[in-house]
Image: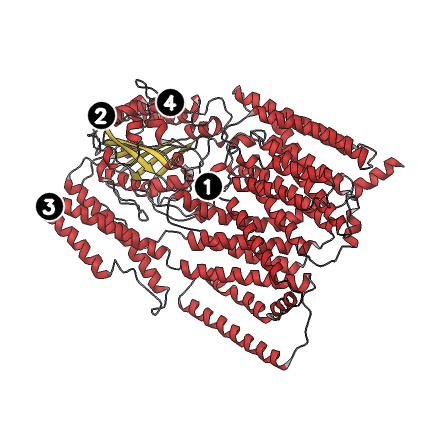
Amino acid sequence: MDLWLVIVGFLVHLVFFMSIFDIYFTSPLVHGMTPMATNIPPPADRLVLIVADGLRADKLFKRESDKQVTAPFLRKKIEVEGSWGVSHTRVPTESRPGHVALIAGFYEDVSAIAKGWKENPVDFDSVFNQSSYTWSWGSPDILPMFAKGATGDHVFTNMYPAESEDFAGSDASKLDTWVFDEVQKFLNESKNDENMHKKLTSTKVVLFLHLLGIDTNGHGNKPYSKEYLENIQVVDTGVKHLEQQVEEYFDNDGKTAYVLTADHGMTDWGSHGAGHPDETLTPLVAWGAGINKARPGNKKDFQDNFIEEWKIENRRCDVNQADIATLMASLIGIAYPMNSVGVLPIGYLNISEEYKAKSLLTNAKQILAQYQVKENHMRDTTLTVFFKPFPFLTDKHQKSKVEEIERYILQKQYDLSMKASMELIKECLAGLNYYQTYNRFFLGASIACGYIGWMLYIFQHLLHNHTSITVSRPSSPTRVLSQQALDLFFAGLGITIAILLYCQHSPIVYYVYVCLPLPLWYQVLKRVDIFKQMFQYIKSNNMQLQIICYIVIAIGALEVLVLSLFYREVISLGLVSLAVWSLLSSDVLQKKVLLGWIMSCLILAIFPMMPVVGREPNLQLVSLASFLCISVFIIASILKSRYLFISDISTIKIVQFVILCLAIFIVHSTSRNIQAKEGLPIINQVLSWMILLLSFVLPLLTSDLIVERLFSIASAFVSVYLLMTTAHEGLFCLALCFSLFSWLLVELELCRSSSKLCHLQFERRKLLDDGPSRHLSLSDIRVGYFFIFFLLTAYFGTGNIASINSFDPTSVYCFLTVFNPFVMGMLLLWKIALLFVLVTCTFQAIHLVRSVPMSSLFLLVLLMSDAMALHFFFLVRDTGSWLEIGTSISHYVIVMTMILFVLLLMIVSQIFIAPPITLVRSIRKFHRQ
């Protein structure tokens, strides 16, 4: 494979991958505004914010029976003493962006989230920063980012050790009990601390309680479990005692406001991150100073049936999650967070109409200030001739609208002023979105041109270097002149673009995105003769109809791949089609091979139609997969010794068999211990990590024979895969291995039928020395397509893992149970990558069997993958439901990641297919002597 082409390809696709974040995920933050607060005494001196991490709205609000409720204290607040509603979160429904929306009032961009969970990757304002003092208790994953983001030394944190976040612990609700106990301890101690008491009794104070127990129980036991519901009761009781302690401390002065909500919800299978209603609908309950008491219901205002289902007759006030930040700021009279896009939910407020009107005006001015900074920045970085301002919010309109609102307030026409303020806020938010997406079309068009230029370049490279269609032609005076003109045109175009970008003070990445297509299209136009020769070749060989048929089939086949990312059932349809395809070649395939291929495809086709893995753990299916693994290992070893002339069962095979049995024991032992609330045994944890490490080494110690090596790789990886199995994915792994082996045999038979050089048993070193060098044929396109299809089957065969929504810590309980997002994420990624490596190793073997250069097949795969990526690039959207937006973006990221990953997989698979380690071979030879 040409090293320079690999490097260039990797860099080009890295640019394509990163572009999505600059086009769709630019940071919404702007700087240069000044804090704005309502200059009227607020209704509350202090605020108690309680965030129940992972609490679903329905689990809090819904009655367990006609007479029993999950949280009786909070139910009383809803029905008598306070206000309630549903807080609508946004994708991604994760703890960090949820808390940023709640406390800072804006929706964090994905690129910032990716920079870390515990640190502040960007500088932003928050309710805590604007408060006089903030004391917080809870998780070390959440509290530090707001303390480090605050100015001055007025945000204090009290956190339990990270090791306490154990998904397999005996009782996760102890995390919440710890928080309530620490708050009580803090209040008791501050009575004897004059300085602390003075701070606490000042105004604009925030007490923040982050309760992680519900989220931990949801991940470990699922939201419908007894543990999850009991944890809600623990929180309810804790909040009841908390209110008593706070009111007692402040002598029942009526100056404390309470807000209880959640950062995100959770699916029935214990995950979150995507846009399912169970994840985006969270509860909001508020009571105390400045909060409206229960009022008559308004169920006609809502299309859903939640009010009837939850049997709550009082008025419901829904909000967007970012609105809660403005509500908290208004209650204690602090400045709104400067980057907040929340709208003050006046339905919650029990204050004077004047305070509501002035608070809403301040809210509008604060968002208008962000719009003005954003507009000025865009005007400064765009040439006047190209700049197109937002038409509905001119300087004149801004001034007249603010003056109109202020005039209404002076005239005490508060209803009209609040209506006008809401209109101005709506216009400002639309203007912010306009400038947020101002360069989207320009950048998107540049990336699309880059895609097409890259694909044409790769196609030319394939035609010229990997087929016999084109031949080199001598230069002519006409060609030299056209080449010089082409050079001058692209040089002038590049200089012009660079000057325009410089004059607009564009970021460096804009130069990359806009200039990237230039060298690609230059190379394509420079070698346009290759396309002319291709058309001449097709015409001279009367292949027009054949090529048209191939194009139609190729388009249809690629659409199947695209649809498989939306509908898993399409994979099943594709596998059935592969089984039917083999019948067309039944005259050249042995009956055993044909039957094996059809059976493997049909068995594998069952899994995409089964429920998504992780929603319902099933130890019986894990046991069945374990039994089949042992059976297959024994039978395959016997058959290989008998039919493949491998006379001895090597020591490595015995070791792998022992490891396989050990992995099965660990899975069942760990499951029993966790169900008994005894945690993860340390010996199981150590052995699991040892098995993982040995899986990288043992395949390298086996023989050079292809079947022998593939069997060893599969055995090593299946042992690790079983350690991370929770349901039927173990059976899926076996079915995939069966299909991949059948694919290898089918390609072998097809090679033999066409009298091509092929081997099933050979030394890899010999082929590396005498590598095959034949040109590509049309049938090789099938091999590349099958490779991509099996990669997607491995990816989506057991579930839709297009988003972080599929995160299930249960899969990694054999390795660790204490919350560690990095390690857990890496293990879950390796669980997916295991199957990818199996597919790629088989692909490597097939390239050897077919005697075709790996570089040729790789470029075919790259070309088809790029066609899919371009398809999804145009499908990315930022309108519609959050589920649709998140899915469209994640699909593009998946395909782009797959393209970058394929190159890495090729390198990894070559390591596993390489000859045995020399030292081991020498020891083995010495032992035989």
Q: Residue 412's mark?
A: 3
Name the residue at 34% across, 57% down.
Answer: 435
Q: Residue 117's mark?
A: 1
Give the labeled residue for mark 4.
Answer: 234
Using the numbered discs, state the Cα–Cα distance from disc 3 to disc 4 in whole angstroms: 47 Å
Compared with 487, 400 (above or below) is above
Residue 201 seen by the camera: yes
Using the numbered discs, state the Cα–Cα distance from disc 3 to disc 1 in whole angstroms: 47 Å
Q: Earlier in the sequence, mark 3 or mark 2?
A: 2
Q: Secondary structure at mark 2?
A: helix
For label 2, the crowd category at 10 Å Cα-Cα, with few meaning under 14, some 14 to 19 and many 20 or more, is: some
Q: Secondary structure at mark 1?
A: loop
- Percent from the top left, x then y, of residue 910? 70, 47
Display coloring: secondary structure
Compared with 756, 101 (above or below) is above
Using the numbered discs, state the Cα–Cα distance from disc 3 to disc 2 in whole angstroms: 31 Å
In terms of image quadrants, where is residue 387?
bottom left
